[in-house]
Amino acid sequence: MSGLRIVVDDLSGPRIIEFLREHVRQMRSITPPESKHALGLDGLRAPGVTFWSVLDGEDPVGCGAIKRLDAGHAELKSMRTAPERARSGIASRLLEHIIAEAGAMGFTRLSLETGSAEFFLPARRLYEKLGFTYCEPFADYRPDPSSVFLTRRL
């Protein structure tokens, strides 16, 4: 873990682009199309989005982003750990970093949507461990049996 770096990423490098494409492919294989909320590259490059990569050398092993919803509220997006590095602490370290950065940016609330399927259970446990609680849909989300929503005050 000591050799890992968390960096703000402009999403221009081919390695992170492929890492995100794999994320979208995986989500499409698990989640019904009407319940897929992962942002594509253009969405992650949009104003109001900050994207971080976790790098081991030059290789992305994790990523996450926040999307500004309003002056005090941001949404956590695109959290992913390389499958071969799952349960190694990368996601915890990154989420702690994003929570701290969101607070430093002036946000007072951070919310997220994730899947309700068994595949997403480790992610839900991580969010719970770091203080997120279940909530109603926020922003433009609607109730969906394939989704759960969590939020946390910063």
Image (cartoon, helix red, strand yellow):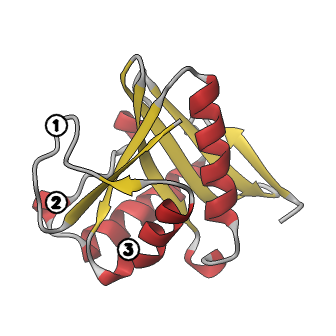
Query: How many angstroms separate mark 3 from mark 1 (CA)?
Result: 21 Å
**Residue found at the far top of this picture:** 71
Question: In the drawing, what numbered circle is on residue 140?
Answer: 1
**Residue found at the far right of this picture:** 2
Q: Nearer the viewer, residue 9 or 97?
A: 97
> For the point 60% across and 42% down, which residue is it?
98
Would you call the spot at circle 2 few (<14 residues within 10 Å), some (14-19), or many (20 or more)? some
Q: Quadrant of residue 7?
A: top right
According to the picture, the residue beneath numbered tag 2 turns out to be 35
Three-letter code, disc 2: Ser
> For the point 42% across and 47% down, which residue is it?
77
Would you call the spot at circle 1 few (<14 residues within 10 Å), some (14-19), or many (20 or more)? few
Left or right: where 97 falls relative to 134? right
Question: In the drawing, what numbered circle is on residue 120?
Answer: 3
The vertical placement of 140 against 146, above or below, is above
> For the point 44% across and 34% down, which residue is it?
109
Please tell me how many numbered marks the rendered image carries: 3
User: Of discs 3 and 2, which sits in the foreground?
Assistant: 3
> For the point 53% across and 35% down, which residue is it?
154
Q: Secondary structure at mark 1?
A: loop
